[in-house]
Image: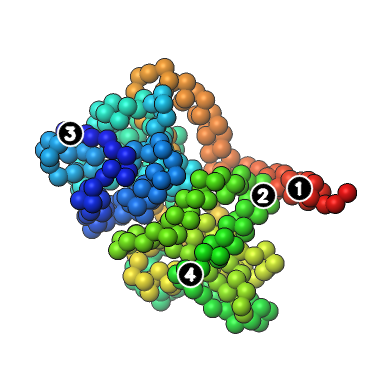
Amino acid sequence: MDISVYRPEELTAADRTAWRTLQSKAYAGGASQLANPFLAPEFTRAVGRCRRDVRVAVLREDGSTGEPAAFFPYQRNAVGVGRAVGLGLSDCQGLVHAPGFRWDAQELLRACGLVIWEFDHLAEGQQPFEQSLLGTFPSPVIDVADGWDAYVARLRARSGRGTRVRLGYERKLARVAGDVHYVHDERDPAMLRTLMEWKSAQYRRTGRSDRFAHPWIRELTEQLFHTRTDSFAGLLSVLYAGDRPVAAHFGVRSEHILACWFPAYDPAFAKYSPGVVQHLRMARGAAEDGLSHLDLGRGQRDHKDVLKTGDVQVSEGWTTRRHPVAAAHWARRAPVRALRNTVVSHPELRAPADRLLRSMGRARTWTATRARSPR
C-alpha cells in the first residue's frame, strides 16, 4: 500500500477526477454517504484555502504510480492531533474509497503523522476507524428519489392532518405578507450576507456560539457560494413573500445529495413557520433538480422529525495510536463530548438545557443592546 500526503491544492486534476469517480461508484454501490458533498474534493479544497492545516492522504494499492483507491482528508496540528476536515461544521466524514477497499487505520495514521484522529459525523462502513466510539447517532434524511409527489404521499401516509397543516403554512404566509415565491438557486451575494446575519442573530438569541463570528467560517461560506462544478455546488435557496425575503438556506450539493447546513429566517414571520415552508420548497426543488435526498444533519429538531423519511447513522469518537499526546487529547475532550451527548440524547435533559441556553442568549442580547445604547 502506498500512502502519499498532499496539500489540497497539490492534488492534480486527475486526482480530483478519481476522487469524484470513487464517490459516484460508492453511491451506485449502496454507500450513499460517501457521495455526500462534505466528502467531495471541492469542500476539502475550500477548507484548505481558509486553513493551512488541511491535508489529503491518497492511498494506492499498486505503488506510487497506481490508480488511487482511496482519499482521506484531514486536519493536523503541530503535535500530530488530527481532526476531520471542518470538524464541528461538516456533517459527513471519513475515507472515500472504492467498493470493497480495506485499510489499516494504524498504518494510515502513521503515514499521515497523526497520533489521534477525531470525528463527530463518521459515515457508516468505516470500521477501521471505529476504535473508540462515544456513540452512533441518527442523521435524518428526506428521500426525494421518486419525486416530490411520492415524498408528499409518504408524509400523508404517516400523518395526513399534520401534512395538510404544514402544506398550508405557505398560504397563511401569503395572506399576511404577499405572494410567496421561492428561488432554489439564488446567486445574489447580498442575500447570502442577509442569511449569515439572520443566523448569527439566531445563534446569539438561542445562547449558541456564533459560527459566523469566526472570519474563516465566513470566508469558507463565501468561497463555497462561488464554487460550482459539474458534481458540486454551494447552493443558496431563498423564500420570498412579496418582495421581502423571509427564510433562506445555504448548503452544499453533490451529484445526488443536498447537505442542509445553514437555515435561518426572519423572526418577524416566526409564527408562520417559514423554516418549514423553506424546507418543503427545498425538497421540491431538489427533486426537480434530480437529487436523491436531502441530508438534514445529526441532531433532533421538531422540523426534522416531521419532514424526514428516514435516518442514516453517523458516529462520534477517535482513532488513536499509543502516544502520550493522544492520551492527553482524549482525556481533555472525552468528558465534554460525553456530557453533551448525554444531554442531547435525553429529552428530559435536552429541554431544560435548551431553555437555559435561550435565557443566556436573551441576557447576552440585552447586555449588547445596553452597551450600544447612547448614555
**Disc 2 + disc 1, Cβ < 8 Å:** yes
**Disc 1 + disc 4, Cβ < 8 Å:** no
| Res 210 label | none
Cα separation between marks 2 and 3: 47 Å
Quadrant, the N terminus: top left
- Total labels drawn: 4
| Res 204 label | 2
Lateral position of residue 308 relative to residue 33, left or right: right
| Res 368 label | 1
Q: Which residue is mark 3?
A: 2
Give the x, y percent position of residue 365.
74, 49
| Mark closer to the chain start, 2 or 1 | 2
Give the x, y percent position of residue 107.
25, 28
Q: Which residue is mark 4?
A: 186
Cα separation between marks 4 and 2: 26 Å
Cα separation between marks 1 and 3: 55 Å
Q: Amino acid at mark 2?
A: Arg
Lateral position of residue 106 relative to residue 368, left or right: left
Are there few (<14), some (14-19), or many (20+) residues within 10 Å of tag 2?
some
- At x 52% / y 56%, what residue is drawn? 262
Q: Is residue 139 visible?
A: yes
Q: Amino acid at mark 1?
A: Ala
- At x 46% / y 25%, what residue is drawn? 330
The local secondary structure at tag 3 comes to strand
Are there few (<14), some (14-19), or many (20+) residues within 10 Å of tag 4?
some
Q: Quadrant of residue 339?
A: top right
The local secondary structure at tag 4 comes to loop
